Image (cartoon, rainbow, N blue to C red):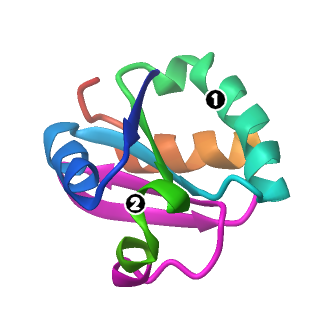
Amino acid sequence: MKTLHARSAEEFHAAITSHPRLLVDFHKQDCPGCRMLEMSLRKVADDPAATGLALLKVGLEDVGEDLFRSLGLRQTPTLSLYGDGVELARLPGFQPPARILDAVEAHFAGVPA
């Protein structure tokens, strides 16, 4: 799984339109749940279901609150799955690896990697 970083709203929008299979990690630096989610994401990255999936890291401190509000985000961490620029699923709060992989498989089954 390739990891990307968005440091602005423009980089976020560019990434969701240029990657057909994208997992977005919305997080904050001082968030304990966000640090725990990092461990889950490392395990997901090693799973065959993540082949062809890109991970976009979007930090509140980098992009600002306006982007988070415009997307209707209410908490960090939040994971979102985007396919061809469209949000397919949103997973708020800490997620174990199995739940993330279930969402990836449910939304990207049959989508070329």
- SS for callout 1: helix
Magenta span includes 87: yes
- SS for callout 2: helix
Residue bounds of the magenta highlight: 69-94
User: Based on the displayed image, in which of its 4 quarters is residue 21 positioned?
Assistant: top left
Q: Amino acid at mark 2?
A: Val
Q: Position of residue 66 (x, y in %)?
A: 37, 79
Q: Position of residue 23 (x, y in %)?
A: 44, 44
Q: Which mark is residue 63?
A: 2
Residue drawn at point x = 49 percent, y = 26 percent: 50
Q: How many marks?
A: 2
Q: Amino acid at mark 1?
A: Val
Residue drawn at point x = 62 percent, y = 46 percent: 100
Q: Position of residue 42 (x, y in %)?
A: 68, 25
Q: Is residue 99 above or below residue 88?
A: above
* First of labels 1, 2 by sequence position: 1
Q: Which mark is residue 94?
A: none
Q: Is residue 71 above or below residue 100?
A: below
Q: Which residue is mark 1?
A: 44
